[in-house]
Image (spheres, rainbow, N blue to C red):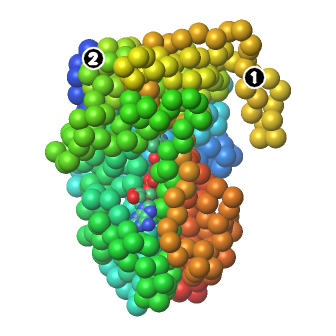
Amino acid sequence: MQTFTETHREEPDKEDVSQRIRTFEEIYRFFTNRKVASQAARCVQCGDPFCTSIGCPLNNFIPQWLEAIAEKDLEKAFLLSNESSPFPEILGRICPHNHLCEGACTLDDGYGAISIGAIEASITDLGFAAGYVLPFPGITTDKKVAVVGSGPAGMSCAHFLLRAGIQVEMFERADVPGGLLAYGIHGFKLSKQIVERRFALLEQAGLRLHLHAEIGHDRIFDDLLADYDAVFLGLGATNGKRAGVANEDNEHVFLAMEFLTNVQRRIADRAWMERFGVLGKRVVVVGGGDTAMDCVRTAVREGAETVTCLYRRNDRNMPGSRKEYLNAVEEGVAFQFLSAPQRVVINDSGEVSGVDVVRTQLGEPDDSGRQRVEEVVGTEFCVPCDVVIMALGFDMEGFPGLRDAGVELGRWGEVLIDAASGRSSNPKVFAGGDCYRGADLAVTAAADGKRAALAIMNQLLG
Ligand SMILES: Cc1cc2nc3c(=O)[nH]c(=O)nc-3n(C[C@H](O)[C@H](O)[C@H](O)COP(=O)(O)OP(=O)(O)OC[C@H]3O[C@@H](n4cnc5c(N)ncnc54)[C@H](O)[C@@H]3O)c2cc1C
Ligand code: SF4
């Protein structure tokens, strides 16, 4: 261990840009056994590891699995990594590490943080390839929990309940499980086979998965309350926001999820719509988070003539993963920072011809500590384009019967819960993930699902 002075931080190799923009395949080639050990051996084994205590929402046993893999004990590293996390190979790929574990790593200041995310993904990939299995006990109790929604929050809750021998039935309205891991996040960041493998494992462990099953529509909520010992809501927040500017109802102004889902449906040979095509078009994406980065990189792969991202703050204030922004730059996306849309411009034929934009500057911090965005008068200009994609965050949708069942909702329709247990105002109902936080991260959804599972276990098993 502590080889950080002689071994530099490395990221996994990436597919060459000219090749990778032709496909939706994952761009990273994760570490081999030898490379993962040498990168893990850089760890200094801090007495108080901030990567775990402050950086990682799941408080993963990072120094412990780094030590195990540095000592070439893959099985120990695999089991340790899968002990606290419900899907380390997924989060190792998609977490914005620079804001989380790697940002809290002692070596980040000067030497280059341990490449925790890549090591984490590699350990579980290599462990599965070596044939290691995860210990699930089978259904050993007479308790039954309904999980509504199959995104990271629901998956995580189901994983930990199944590990305690509790029967779990999952209800998902979509035709495939995974929530935004299935139709939101694209294959170039996270291969769909990796999500499918996790569901296969959960089903082997006893999960009963019901697809095309929308609670509040196909099945009423009161039935779940009557038939199960507890209910976990991992409903997500998928109602796309618009910018509130003129002409944004034009048919060539898309919401991010309409665009992303449509492309993913076509790739998976499911029903899709021609009207969201961007081949040969000039595309403007509004927003600066992970969703916006997925949109710009998808538009590049879909053959857009140009792709421009408009973001009203600067690159240092982008909420998503730094590495995905840099990947987008490599793939030819143009960024207009400190730029806010004012209106979508429509030509005489009723088609989109541009977006009028005003320059912004960052002012004093608001109550949340983020600097306010101020428009700079007299700096207006037009970005010519044929299609605009709004990637501005999401609101919660909810479903009929939730409030009637005594589940309190907040101002934005979010489920109100006790943060320590995930319990709602109805003691039988728990919630977590984006339907509680608003659009956030897969890892925070996973942490919420885990916390709720532990509280449900306490409530049901004592
Ligand atoms: C394009 C995009 C890219 C992203 N990239 C990243 C990234 O790189 N890293 C990262 O950490 N996060 C990323 N995120 C955010 C991350 O995907 C979400 O924070 C996370 O998926 C939230 O998990 P969840 O389980 O709360 O909700 P979701 O993943 O939204 O899952 C909710 C599920 O509930 C189902 N559902 C809703 N209502 C009902 C009902 N009434 N009955 C049955 N089922 C229902 C929905 O169909 C959905 O499948 C991205 C998001 C998007 C949109
Ligand atoms: S889950 Fe995310 S934050 Fe936690 S160790 Fe893995 S990559 Fe880092």
Residue 318's image quarter? Answer: top right
Residue 229: % across, % down: 49, 86
Q: Which residue: 47% across, 89% down? A: 226
Q: Which residue: 83% across, 26% down? A: 364
- Where, quadrant-wise, is the C terminus in this rendering? bottom right
Residue that badge 2 annotates:
280
Q: Which residue: 59% across, 35% down? A: 244
Residue 365's image quarter? Answer: top right
Q: Nearer the viewer, residue 164 or 285?
A: 285
Residue 391: % across, % down: 49, 35
Ranked by sequence position, the earlier of labels 2 and 1 is 2
For ligand 1, tell me if the residue under mark 2 lies within 8 Å.
Answer: no
Farthest-out residue, front: 348
Question: Residue 355, can we see it?
Answer: yes
- Kind of residue indicated by mark 1: Glu
CA distance for labels 2 and 1: 34 Å
Residue that badge 1 annotates:
374
Q: Secondary structure at mark 1?
A: strand
Q: Which residue: 25% across, 62% down? A: 200
